[in-house]
Image: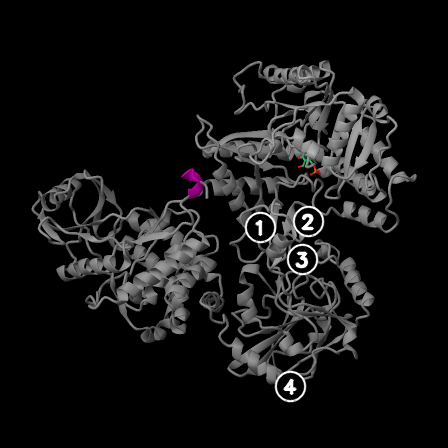
Amino acid sequence: MIKILRRPELDAADALAAVREHYGLDGSLTPLPGERDLNFRLDATDGRRYVVKASSPDEVDEILHIEVDLTRHLARLTKGFAPDVVPTSSGDWVVKYADAAGRENRIRVVEYLEGGLLADTRPRSRALLEDLGRRVGELDSALGAYPDHPPARIDFDWALGRSGMVMERCFDLFQGEELALIRSVHAAWLEREPDFLGLGSQVIHGDINDHNVLVSAPGDGTRRITGIIDLGDAHSAPRVFDLGIAIAYAILGTPDPLMAAAAVARGFHRRTPLSTDEIDVIWALTRARLGASVSIARWRQHESGTVDPYLTVSERPAWDMIRRLHEIPVRFAEGVIRDACGLPASPRTPGLVRWLEKQKIEAVMDRPESDDELTVLDLSLGSPDLTGRDTDDTEDFTRRVFRRMEDEGAKLGIGRYLEPRAFYLTDIFRGRPGDPRERRTIHLGIDLFDQAGAEVRAPLAGRVKSVHDNGTGLDYGPTVILEHDGPEGPFWTLYGHLERASVEHLTEGAEVEAGQTIARIGPWPENGDWPPHLHFQILTDLLGYEGQFPGVALPRERAVWASFCPDPNLVLRLPGTTTFVEPDDLAERRRAAFGENLSLSYDEPLHIVRGVGTFLYDPLGRAWLDCVNNVAHVGHEHPHVVRAGQRQMGVLNTNTRYLHENVIVYAERLAAVFPDALAVCFFVTSGSEANELALRMARAHTGGSGVVALEGGYHGHTQGLIDVSHYKHASPAGAGAPDWVRTAPMPDEYRGLYGRDVMDRADRYADHVRTAFAELTASGRKPAAFIAEGILSCGGQIEPPAGYFETAYRHARAAGAVCIADEVQIGFGRVGSHMWGFEIEGVVPDIVTLGKPIGNGHPIGAVVTTREIAASFANGMEFFSTFGGNPVSAAIGLAVLDIVEEDRLQEHAAVVGGTLKANLASLAMRHECIGDVRGRGLFLGIEFVRDRLRKTPAPDIARYVANRAKDLGVLLSTDGPDHNVIKIKPPMTFTQKDGERLASTLDQVLGEDAVRSGVGG
Ligand SMILES: Cc1ncc(COP(=O)(O)O)c(C=O)c1O
């Protein structure tokens, strides 16, 4: 029978009366949660806060007094981390108070510690969880110094040591899946129970649940644990029980509970080192706490026939967690915790490694006569030999692998251990959820590439553990596992991608001699649909797998898997570097090699080595959905573009002083997508060059030099363009505008001079262009150009009010200037409704400049203008750009145009962008910090504000959102004069699914504490 302590029946008025009488305190009481004690927060008239606790009438006095004593002990040792008891006016710690009904209550007052509850903290970051572990370690050290042990609470159902019994007694109350889960948790408990005897005993807190842990407010640096409260369940037990309990609640609601558990354990161990015996029971303790929690809840419901809300609050998440933890092999989970505490994840591995180093071992496959005929293949993420889409076409993949071996004169190709690989990026290798960036990309074996039919031999004597066909869909295909006798028990070797017929004679349990042929390399597709090779791996624990075993691992688990699957070269003994090593000094080298003002994105910069479609990948194969790269217009590394460049590169790349058809066709194709008047092309290599050239043309044509540009505008990095770019010259480090430049206000309908409520705002904004030109003229500067983007990018994705450009262009032309449309960011269909930004308003500029997306990453810039302006520019001085318009660039530019047209990317941007904008608008209804959602097609912006009425910019929130979205696998960036706008301008191949992911990631991040509290991170 589980005994339940009654709660006291004291009402707030009586509690307040008691506090007035005995503590001389007054104020207002607010109920606080509590299972056994009745708790109130007292907001006292002296401005301070306290907790008033009334104890259960069933609680014995002795325990109450020990709890008070313990509280005082802890408060003294932890310096404000645990709340102290407040004495009564007469110096007592507990008062007896008879309420109106004559019931005697025992009341105490303790300090109120400020801080949010861990239970309400979003997100529970790795750093915060580590801090929790550290603080639990400190608390238990302080508790360990408490001299008197409280009496054992014989019938105390929440004591972790009793959870085996608690679960067992409730078996009858569960059925089906729930019963199976509880039985499994119980069995794991029983298995570890004998180990508890050696763990010692001290006073422990006993209930470090997430409602008893306090967390600092967001925005105050890294969030920390600021207090642990409520000693009501303190009892004698091993200290590691506190850690097990803390983990059980700390991991609730975390995306990867296993890694979260490891973080708490790591924090504890770093502060208060744990013994191996302690480390090895943590996982069983954590699961048991969850099992006991749902068992107690079920028991109470059964007993009372009612549902206690305090208990059911934690029941559902506990069940979800029990289910999730059940899916993780126990030894693996224990290995993750061991690894976090600095132990080898697989206890047997160090001994096995030493033993294998001394063994005589037979060759697994025929070795070529010379080591020169062996080659290590680069199958890593950044390998130029891979396409990132390799598994789509096994024949082509095979041809490439074997051609590479042939080129190197190799008979045997080696695929490395721990290599993160570009061909595991698909959802088939998704793995355990918890980090949306990760797939199982890390290779745990060594591959030996040879022709199908090549023989495979046993390196050591042993027996056949399993022969299993693991299917053809990028799995192992036919697979053999051999069992061998190691120094501390068995270990296993795995052989994957075999020929089906070659393993049919093998029977499980059959003895195998060292050097005996066991199989042959299989052809595709029967080998799992891979280029022919052997996957060889060492296993030190089968972890419950039968007939197969993971051959690839998630990046965050690679150290743990590397312990369970030590280096296969211990057996293969191949020369050369057969383990992948990731360069880790790039940031430092970059700092030394480059100027400091070449910035990196994000607080923690990304190292990117591959792009495919809308995704970018780091060396470990972690994927980010790219929502900002308007350069990779048709998708990163689009095969058609890549091929076009590669093919032309091998034939000719020279300047435009010779006739070459590519560049002429390209100029013709480009001119064809512009209004008729814009008929002449000039090619350069960047947006800056294009804008410089455009200004030269404008000057040549008008004979003037004055330029009007818009506030917040950016047009390039040359001195001339910094002079016209308000975004740069008006920045704190800028020198201001020179006398030949005037800026007109940004036509910003949200926070600019004229808002959406001003009916003639377009005309009013355009009138500033008129006055700017008038000022230029008055100062003796003859106008040459008005330069602007159709939607202002660096200005913060600002779409001017309808009619603005029509009037502004009229004013500019009336002043004698020509109009330059900078389409470097927004061109090529991005705005969805039109091919070019200027077309939104139906105006025709005199000069258009192009860059970024035009070459999908290849450096191309272009100026397209009228025949008249081109003629004025041909004033006798030659125009020449060495690289502009070279045949390779032209081939690439043509390929980009092909895809934009064939895949109808403009229409696609309109549809996908339309849905995305609607989804963002609905986020704005839920999240107060969104001030404005704007833009068109796939060129959108979200402006963050502190409050909607005043529109106070919230750059911290924008920055927090970009950094957090990055952690969740989505790339965004911030811009705008106040740095409070999130820019969205992804590759144009962005899908509806990508858009949904972006919106849901934003929704998640905007729900986090740092955003809700308005402080950012
Ligand atoms: C609107 C606009 N124009 C011109 C440029 C300059 O292009 P590039 O960096 O290729 O010289 C940029 C670059 O960010 C831009 O955003």
| Tag in front: 2 or 1 | 1
User: What segment is highlighted magenta in the picture?
Assistant: 1009-1015
Query: CA gap, disc 3 to disc 4?
Result: 35 Å
Q: For the residues marked 1 and 4, what is the alpha-carbon distance in whole angstroms?
A: 47 Å
Q: Position of residue 133 (x, y in %)?
A: 38, 60
- The amino acid type of the residue labelled 2 equals Val
Mark linked to residue 605? 1
Residue holding disc 4: 360
Pointer 1 residue Cβ closer than 8 Å to ligand 1: no
Disc 3 C-beta below 8 A from ligand 1: no
Looking at numbered disc 1 in the image, what kind of residue is underneath it?
Pro
Q: Is residue 255 left or right of residue 156?
A: right
User: Which residue is found at the position 64% from the left and 55% from the top?
Assistant: 425
Left or right: residue 827 versus residue 92 is right
Disc on the earlier residue, 2 or 3: 3
Q: Earlier in the sequence, mark 1 or mark 4?
A: 4
Identify the amino acid type marked 3: Leu
Q: Residues within 10 Å of mark 3 (few under 14, many from 20)?
A: many
Crowding at dot 2, Cα within 10 Å, few <14 / some 14-19 / many 20+, comes out as some
How many neighbours does mark 4 have within 10 angstroms: few (below 14), some (14-19), or many (20 or more)?
Answer: few
Residue type (three-letter) at the residue carrying disc 4? Lys
How much space separates mark 2 and mark 3, taking CA atoms? Answer: 11 Å
Q: Position of residue 978 (x, y in %)?
A: 53, 33
Magenta run includes residue 1012: yes
Point out the quarter of the image occupied by ligand 1: top right
Q: Which residue is mark 2?
A: 612
Q: Residue beneath label 3, please? A: 381
Say which of 946 and 543 sits in front.
946
Q: Looking at the image, which residue is at 47% across and 28% down?
A: 951
